[in-house]
Image: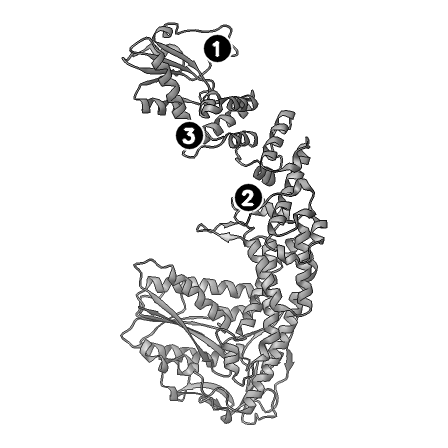
Amino acid sequence: MQATQTLPDAAKDAIRREFDRAESNDPIVLWWDDGNYLEDILQQACTDLSVPLKTAEKTPLELRADPVDGEQVWYVPHVKAPADTDGDYDWFRDIEHTGSEVEMSIEDLTVHVFGSERLQAWELKNATRSDNPQQRREIARILHDQLTGGQLPTLEQLRTQIVTGGYTDPVAFILENGWADIDDDRQTIEQMTDLLTSEGVDAVADENDPGAIETQTRRWAVAEWLIHAGADAEQFPSEFRAETAGAHDLPELKSLLNNTTSPGLIADRYLDATIWPDVVDTIDDPWELSSCIVDAALERRLWEEWHESFDVGDYEACLDRAEERYDALLGSEDIHGNYRGGYGPDNPWTQTWEQAAEVARLAHQLDTWDERVTDDVVSLYADEDDGTWQIDNAVLNLVVSGEPETDLPREHPATETLDDLRTELQSTYVDYLEDLGDLVTETVEAGAPFVDEDHAYQFFTKESDGLESGQTVALFVIDALRLDLARRLADELREYVATLPADAPEFAVEESVWLGTLPSETEFGKAALTPGEVQMFDISLVNGDLQPLRNNRRVTTNRRNSLLDGDGWRVTREDDEGWQSKRVAYFKNDLDNMGEKELSDLEAMLAQRVDSLAEFIGTKIEQGEWDQAYVLTDHGFVLLPHDVTPEKISRPAEASDSGRRWIAGEDVDEDSPGVLLDASTRLGYLDANVSAFASPLKRFSKQGVGDARFYHGGLLPQEFVLDFISITQG
């Protein structure tokens, strides 16, 4: 039964009716209130009627002051005969001849907004009128709020709001709050039972205990969602067989998740409770119900079957199912960044299935990476869509995502299985790195696999058009930016420039694969990224010391800065200094420093550093007037799991110089440890015999250098296959 008018409209009708009955040409309506809940409503009504409203502040006698001609309303914001006062104060007997006296509270006026259904509205008033002042104020607030707006409620919605303290849906109230602060007197229990059964919750029809009403309502709602998802309704007791007309009629619990601001509470309440285990056990394929995100019995069956599929190696199916469950638990994001219809991204159930998807994806990649028959190691690793760089990215994500299952109840099977899967994949990752190293060894020994690639030492020549002196250029040289991190950075930069104001310049973010200088260490890599002609750069043995040379002079940090300065660059290592120049070269070593210092939580720190770099670079691009910007790096790195330690190999006698992963010397040959890089490799710049490790588990002992799990200098693609980013305006 819908309200037919607002409280101000009902007040106007009452006032006009009393004016029409008056014997005087200048009638007065005296309106007594009980609680002063109607003053603004009467003010609106009188404004619409164009009649004066006079309000008594302290005593009704004030209303006789400053008389006016014509129709008017006098308002007394308290009862005519207070409860603590003897007698009936009829102070305005003359109004009998000039107008009318109205004694009406907000509850009384509410009856009038329902028109022909006033009898039921009176029943509402009698059922909800409270002698408790605080409770009455809350009732008056609800009536005022609901009956003065544009969308008028039904009588049942008002009843529900008054009983629940503000909810229009009795089922949603019980599902989210339980019995909460509702009175547990017999009358209130009967009202709530009546409200719930009127919404189809037959399971509470015979209950008279608040706890039982709460339990049965929740069981009914879970049954409703299971049936809506596809469970056989006949498996449930008749009073729990909620009717579901179709996909557009949402189950009450899902509807609640579309509106609640506390989805985590719903998850804890309905995924942490086994509600219909017998029914769930009868389901042949629980994945048919994966959209139902309540009932621990279903959640546990889904995980157990997912784990069984993983154990038999059906990784693609595991990935699809984990993503399916993750999407259901996540819900959908609205324009304000809130999640509706699910539990959001920060809930442990959601995060556990998100990691399950990462686990399945990584397992599939590790299982299939070597199915491509190729001797092009660079393409195998760096291909944007299918390259094995994604394995490094997935391992990093897996570590960063932590152990979400530890926040689940102990009964969830993921608490016993997910950690084992992470450990297993870390071990498989090391096997993959070893196999990849073997493949590099084979391809190098079989020929010259790097001849047709772009090499970092050629960068300034090949990009000369983008580095013309007339252009404003920002050069960001980030130490140890491994290919997967660089691609993550490029994606974040694309997102950044896409959010720039409409009147800001447009920027295109593009990537290209380059090979870092071998050995893949900072000394050689940064020396290569220095202005100068291609034929002027080489790496040679000088008195037994392997050195990067340009124009036959060793390139040290000072020399590199001098060369950059001579080519018109302002070199800076500070975030806020030197950026007023038109050609800025910014150097940052923090990624390498974090790895080599063996900091804890290294994976998380690397991921966070990419985020901060994206914001920093994006801000500089936005603030400056740059025609062109580049993000370069000198080398990548190998990052082993925590429990893996590389083998330390003593520096052989034939070596005159060495690093973590390479040796150099006149007598270094094919019998030396590692893979020989000599003239036959045709790198174009290496004028020395160098042997480098391709195995991830080998390194040369070097005084003062620990056996960190982070290192570089060798021949794994992770160490020397690089991603350079260009950002172009226009």
Foreground residue among 696 and 727:
727
Q: Label 2, label 3: how many angstroms apart (C-alpha)? A: 25 Å
What's the amino acid at mark 1? Ala
Which one is earlier in the sequence, the residue at label 1 or at label 2? 1
What's the amino acid at mark 2? Leu
Callout 1: SS: loop
- Label for residue 256? 2
Q: Say whether residue 233 is left or right of residue 448.
A: right
Callout 3: SS: loop
Which one is earlier in the sequence, the residue at label 3 or at label 1? 1
Q: In this view, does 576 lie above or below 158?
A: below
Instruction: Name the quadrant of the C terminus.
Output: bottom left
The reply to whether callout 1 and callout 2 are in contact (CB within 8 Å) is no
Q: Label 3, label 1: how many angstroms apart (C-alpha)? A: 28 Å
**Residue 236's image quarter?**
top right
Foreground disc of the pair 1, 2 = 2
Callout 2: SS: helix
Q: Is residue 418 above or below residue 177?
A: below
Which one is earlier in the sequence, the residue at label 2 or at label 3? 3
According to the image, label 3 marks what residue?
Answer: 148
Q: Say whether residue 309 is left or right of residue 338.
A: right
Q: Does the rendering let one see residue 351? A: yes
According to the image, label 1 marks what residue?
Answer: 81
What's the amino acid at mark 3? Thr
